[in-house]
Each structure stands twice: as structure tokens, then as C-alpha cells.
Amino acid sequence: MDMDLLQEAIPFLLKGAQVTLLIGLFGVLVGLPLGVLLALLRLSGRPWVVTCCSAFSGFFRGTPLLVQLFILYYGFGQLEFVRHNPVLWWVVGSSLNCAVLTVVLNTVAYTSEIFRGGFQSIPHGLVEAAQACGMSKWVTFLRVRFPLALRQALPAYGNEIAIIVKESSLASTITVLEITGYAKRLMSETFAIIEIFVIASVFYLVINLVAMLLVRQFEHYLSGGVKATRKIRI
Amino acid sequence: MTDVWRFLFEQGWAVSLLKGSAVTLGLGLLGMCVGLIVALPLAIVRWREVYLLGRLVEAYTMLVRSIPGLLIIYLIFFGSVQVVDQIGAFFGFQSALRSAYPFLMGVLAISIISSAYSVEVLRGALATIPEGLIEASKSLAMPRKAIYLRIVLPLMLRNALSGINNVWQMTIKDTSLVSVVGLGELMRTAALAAGISRSPLAFYLIAGLVFLLITWLSQRLFRVCEVHLNRGFRGAR
């Protein structure tokens, strides 16, 4: 791998990394609270709410992100009333905004599934005990249910963060230039396919590793270390 | 709406979309199977913590799982065009290889991605097998092959099923990425139809519905398998 190529590629990919990080941050900061909310709504027991939320989550988990992205960007972009509505057009008309919105909606669906499992895993006795102590519903949620669900859901949510970062690469298909978008452009300009791939991968690896380490630290903070069992040779 | 209807049935786009769905399914199934076949030995290597090899497998899965599928697909398609062409020219079946090339490379890319996830799933399932069971089978002097075939793999399969289901859902959705490099699967066909008919909303929604149908049907199939595998266990639904 020669130095000229590195010098040419890295500034572009750094610019792309900013966009990737931007999409990823939105995905986590907006997607996590909305995902927890959706999980709670799905557990609320009101038939209509549960049906609607399940349908939302089913659609976004059952179709590829690429389809969702194209439906929003090309499909809704074609409708007259979207074009004439300034707010909607601000979202759908700009490729970056559209990519952010799609990634957020997609991750909300997955996060709700993760946290639904987390909330369901809480022993009912704990909630009853909290109520017996006179905790209000809100305090029970804040002090008992949410921390326990978070501990349960955190490993899976760590994976979800990595998925958000990877899914952000699809934004390049609607002309957003993030890491993969720049990588593709550089591949077709320099023909140094493997080299560009390696450099771009390193960018993704670093982002994902940092995110994973942060999640691990947090996980460690929330729960004590678990001892590994010894293996017997077969 | 009538326009879309005409496009679908009078100009034959419905048939093209069906064909595209078949390609998507084939791509997903082949990628998934190849991925699982590759993943099993790798998962066992990781489970038994084989010196060095286990670490290598860990690095492989870690790497593939943190790089976007799209980037892997770009690498495989752009990186292999020349090589494959040369191989084809050498053996004299260039044209045959050229027409099958996108599909083969698609399968390769999809199986690389799905194998990395499958390794993790299978390893997780293997890890839930109590060491005592293996100790017991060793104490009965079962040969190694029998331990794997009779004890380890059946137990693993039961535990891995829900994870395999997840990987399958992911894999079938990942096949849509291959459309970006021009393989005529469902998403690509929908994009072509959307371009010609100038009604992207309808055709992308149709593509989404087909994907929903595929995931929903396969979900039900997995449910049946799950019931079957859990039949000997208490509390099975």
C-alpha cells in the first residue's frame, strides 16, 4: 500500500466518517428513548396500541432497510402533497435527512424488540415488591423496571449500535457521501479496490470498537463480572 | 393506480417481479446454507477454545460483523471482476461465467456475511450445553464422533434455532444489497419497474410486501421446527 493512496483516501474517508457518526449518533440518541417508549407501549396491554406498535415494528423488521429508504426517498418524494409541504419536504427532499429518518425508524423497531424482552424478563415479584413498598408507577419504572431491563438488554443493544453504524452505509445508495459512499467513489477512481476496502474497514472497525468498549464498560458497571467455566477436552 | 395495474399485468412486470423474488429467495437460501456449513466447524473451534485458531475465528467474525455488508459486496464485485474474467478466458467458458457471475459473487458475499453471524449463534448455543453432559459421555467411553453426533449437535440445534432464525431474517434482507451491483433480484427489478413506470412508491411498496411475505412465511416455518425440536422438553409450547 503506497503513501500517495493513503494521503488521497484518508481526508475523504474522514469527511465520510463525520457523516457516518452523525447518522449513528442520531440513531442512538433518538432511537433509544423512542425504542424504549415503543417497548412500553407494546407491553401496555391496550389492544389497539399493541396492534399498531406491533405492525410498525413488524414492517420495519420484516423489510430491508434499502426498501424503506427507497420508499421514503423516491416513493414519498414523488407525491404532490409531500412536495408542497415544507416540513415533509425538508425531511424527504434532502438525502441526508431522509437517511437519518430511515435509520432512526428502523432502529426504533429493533430497540423496542430488545427492550420488550428486557422488560418481560423482570420477575413479577420485584414489581409487586416495589408496589408493596408504596412506590408509584413512575418511581417503580425509574428505580426497578428500567435499570433491570437495561441490564438485561444492554448486550443486545450493543449489537444494535454496531448495526446502526453499519446500516448507515446504505445512505450511500441515495447519494449521501459517508464512508462507504466515498469508498465506492475512490474504488472506481483509483482502482485500488482492496486497499480502499481495508482503509474504509479500519474506519468502521474503530467506530464499532469504541462503541463496543463503551457498552462493555457500562455493562461491567451495571453487573459484576461473571466467572468463566473451565473446558474439558473432548 | 390504474397505471401501476397496467404495468404489472399488461406489460408483464408482475412476472419479472416474481422472477426477481425467486432470485432473492435462491440467493438467500444458498447464502444461508453455505454460511451455516462454513460456520459449524468454526463455531466448534471457538467453543473448544482451540489454541490460536479460536482467536483467528474470533477475529474473522469480529471483522465481518463490524464492516457494512455493502462494503463487502463492493470488495467482492469490484475486486473480482478481472480475476474471474481471466479464469473464464483460461478455461474457455467466459460467456457462461459472465452471465452467472453476479449471482455467484452474490452468493459468496452473502455467505461470508451470514457465516460470521452464524458462528456467533452456534457458539452461543454450544456454550449452553452443560459441561457435565460431555463429561458423562466421556465417562461412558463414547467415541468422539458419537459425542458430537448424538449429544453436542442435537442439543446445539435446539438452542441455536431462534438465533438461526434471526440470521436468516437478516440474510434475506441483506440480499437486497446485491441489487446495488446489478444482480436482477427483487429489489433491482422493482427499481427498474419504478424507473420505467415513474411510480416508485407503488413498486417499492410491492417489494417491501414481498419481503414481508417471505419473512412471515419463514417465521411460521421456524415456529413449526421449534415445536418439533422442543417436543421432548417440559414446558414446550
Image (cartoon, coloured by chain):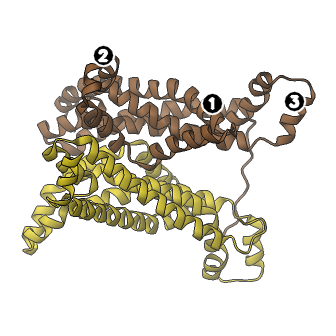
Chain colours: A brown, B yellow
Q: Nearer the viewer, mark 2 or mark 3?
A: 2
Q: Which mark is residue B223?
A: none
Pointer 1: residues within 10 angstroms few (<14), some, or many (20+)? few
Left or right, residue B36 beside residue A169: right
Amino acid type shown at disc 2: Pro
Helix, strand or loop at label 2? It is helix
Q: Who is closer to the viewer here, B83 or B103?
A: B103
Going 53% across and 64% down the picture, which residue do you hit?
B220
Left or right, residue B179 beside residue B222: left
Left or right, residue A1 beside residue B177: left
Q: Earlier in the sequence, mark 2 or mark 3?
A: 2
Q: Position of residue A41 (x, y in %)?
A: 63, 34
Pointer 3: residues within 10 angstroms few (<14), some, or many (20+)? some
Q: Earlier in the sequence, mark 2 or mark 1?
A: 2
Note whether residue A54 is visible.
yes
Pointer 2: residues within 10 angstroms few (<14), some, or many (20+)? few
Q: Which mark is residue A217?
A: 1
Going 51% across and 34% down the picture, which residue do you hit?
A108
Helix, strand or loop at label 3? It is helix
Q: Earlier in the sequence, mark 3 or mark 1?
A: 3
Is A225 situated above or below B237? above
Q: Quadrant of residue A5?
A: top left
Which residue position is annotated with label 3? A130
Q: Position of residue A195 (x, y in %)?
A: 24, 41
User: Same chain, marks 2 and 3?
Assistant: yes
Most extreme residue toward the front, as rendered? B2
Which residue position is annotated with label 2? A86
Q: Quadrant of residue B127?
A: bottom right
